[in-house]
Amino acid sequence: MQTDKVLAEIKDIMVERLKFQPSRLPDLSLATVLPKDIEGSLGLDSLDFIELSIGIEERFGFVIDETQDLAPHFHTLGTLAEYIKSRLV
Amino acid sequence: MVMLGLRVAVRMTSTIEDVAPRWYSHPYNRANFYRLAAALTWVPRRLRLALARHIGRLAPSLMPSERAAIQTAMTRFTGATGSQLDALTVRVFTDFAMCFSDLVSTNRQPAALRSAHLDHVEGIERLASLSGGLISLTAHVGNWELAGRLLAGRSARPTHVVVAPDEARELERWVRRDGEGVRFVSRSRPTVSLELLAALRRGEVVGVQGDRALGTKGDVEVPFFGRPARFPLGPFLLSSGIGVPLLPAFCLLDAQYRYVVKIAEPFIAARGEEEAAARTWVAALEAIVRQYPTQWFNFFDIWEPFAR
């Protein structure tokens, strides 16, 4: 799956599960930072990350159960798209 | 930070607004106080607890705001008034002093020595019946930290205990030590929930305290002793997200100064029914507090935690 396709799926999840406003979708890019407390980020809190990760599991059909730190994968939409692609291989 | 209107559906139902990043603070929960208590570790436990009770009896007069908060709580929990209310209020401080003394001494002993102070576990079969990941839900009642360590030993699964960021940083040396299957996880980063979900997916245990609101839209209002109070919704979203059970567990000091662990009926939060699951939890908490009102160790107004 190509990166732009994965990104589109992530945006769908954000609208469906995080109630992200569809009108703001054009603002999002691969460089968009996700966690709160970072300047310019989307401001996702811990509960948002629960919703996002479960949405990804359901949409892409794999389980996120790694022992290593997952935070770097969920830092930006770009890193998240790359992580998802790596899990789909 | 650019907030773009992200809110999950369940939290859209709440009218709670973000008000403060912290629920409560006081000058006592700090390293020097822990160091002083830890210095008494060498004293035989019976004598140490007697000393703790003595200090506890002095505390209400030195801590007027905490005393007022406890009096409010005791009034609502028990209906007591007058001298009976005063006695209950003092008892909260003496019970807390004993549990705190054990927290920095008995809790740190090897498991075999620690278990000598455990009278019995009620509902252990409920833990034994659960396989796979589970969320151990407890509260600031009795010796909650000991409950986590005991359950970690009984479940024979790695246990990730979620703690407030300031506690993790300052108190790690005394009580937040990893080991014996227990790992303390600070919720300082929003991505901590990813770690917890992954651990649950691996069949491990996540221990959380479900009685202190965070002051964010992640809180939900639930009646507690007849009045609305805020409780954190996170444990129930974890449960509903991947279908793991929540297991309420409490560790109480009995009349002989031994501990009793009480494990309540496990339940799973259904998707979209997280607030109902929170009410189930609060009912279990109320039942314990009714039974052990003086081991309620939240020294602030639980119904108005962010009032200044």
Image (cartoon, coloured by chain):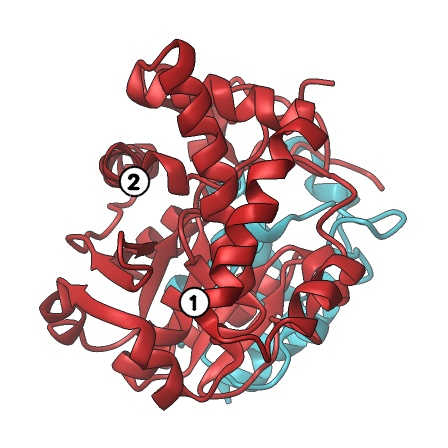
Chain colours: A cyan, B red
Residue B6 visible in the shown view? no
User: Along the horizontal axis of the image, is A80 left or right of B80?
Assistant: right
Quarter of the rendering occupied by the C terminus of chain B: top right
**Label 2 sits on what residue type?**
Tyr
Callout 2: chain: B
Q: Nearer the viewer, residue A33 or B102?
A: B102
Callout 1: chain: B
User: Along the horizontal axis of the image, is B229 left or right of B105?
Assistant: left
User: Along the horizontal axis of the image, is A23 left or right of A36?
Assistant: left
Please name the residue shown 74% across and 43% down the image.
Answer: A26
Which of disc 2 and disc 1 is earlier in sequence? 1
Cα distance in 3D space between marks 1 and 2: 21 Å
Give how far across and how far down residue B267 sits, in percent.
Answer: 19, 52
Please name the residue shown 22% across and 69% down the image.
Answer: B119
Q: Secondary structure at mark 2?
A: loop
Residue density around tag 1, few if under 14, some if 14–19, many if 20 or more, within 10 Å: few
Q: Nearer the viewer, residue B39 or B193?
A: B39
Residue A40 visible in the shown view? yes
Give how far across and how far down residue B215 sits, in percent.
Answer: 63, 32
Please name the residue shown 56% across and 43% down the image.
Answer: B56
Give how far across and how far down residue B166 sits, in percent.
Answer: 74, 56
| Position of B285 relative to B166 (above/below) | above
Residue A35 placement: quadrant: bottom right
**Label 1 sits on what residue type?**
Arg
Q: Which mark is residue B46?
A: 1
Q: Which mark is residue B292?
A: 2
| Position of B101 relative to B153 (above/below) | above
Q: Which mark is residue A42?
A: none
Quarter of the rendering occupied by the N terminus of chain B: top right
